[in-house]
Image (cartoon, rainbow, N blue to C red):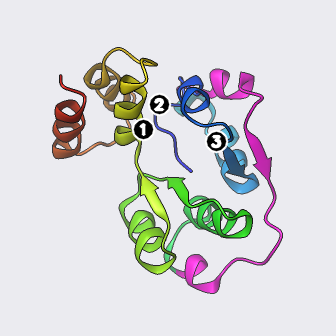
Amino acid sequence: MQYGSADRPDTLRGLYESVYLPQAMHDEILRGGRRFTGLDAYRQADWFTVSALRQPGDPLLAAVLDVGEASVIQLAREIGVPRVLMDERKGRRVAREVYGLDVMGTARLLTDAKEAHLVANVGELLQQMRGAGYWIHSRIMEAAMKAAKE
């Protein structure tokens, strides 16, 4: 589960009653070190439910996705969560088309957060993410800002 605006994990908390994170993704975030701009905020967000996978991963997932995306899909399947947050294109396609999950990206999360009055400006946050090295296609940014009425 990638959350590009991780310096604002409170946005997730404001939108969802529960947020689950596979142990592999949690470890990946913590290994991100200084490159991960929101590491301090993430460490302070003690309301994430970090879970180890109970079953071996689907071989398809391991063959086509990295450990983070594969573990997000596997955990969603294990605990019966219908929606995942994922920005990586291949992972989104596999989650949606193979496993029937509802997939949303960070841009959609931010537009939902603006609608809920949790953030003031989606475009500004997306620009900050880009400035921190997070790749976001210009069309995605434009669509998000249009949806956010910016």
Compared with 133, 98 (above or below) is below
Front-most of 83 and 129? Answer: 83
Q: Is residue 38 magenta?
A: yes
Inter-mark Cα distance, 2 to 1: 10 Å
The residue identified by callout 3 is: 29
Residue at position x 33%, y 26% from top? 131
The residue identified by callout 2 is: 5
Inter-mark Cα distance, 1 to 3: 19 Å
Callout in the foreground (2, 1): 1
Compared with 47, 27 (above or below) is below
Inter-mark Cα distance, 2 to 3: 12 Å
Which label was assigned to residue 109?
A: 1
Q: Is residue 120 magenta?
A: no
Q: Earlier in the sequence, mark 2 or mark 3?
A: 2
Report helix, strand or loop for mark 3. Answer: helix
Residue at position x 31%, y 25% from top? 122
Which image quarter is the C terminus in?
Answer: top left
Report helix, strand or loop for mark 1. Answer: helix
Q: Earlier in the sequence, mark 2 or mark 1?
A: 2
Label 2 crowding class (10 Å Cα cut-off): few <14, some 14-19, many 20+? many
Give amino acid for label 3.
Ile
Residue at position x 46%, y 19% from top? 118
Q: Earlier in the sequence, mark 1 or mark 3?
A: 3
Label 3 crowding class (10 Å Cα cut-off): few <14, some 14-19, many 20+? many
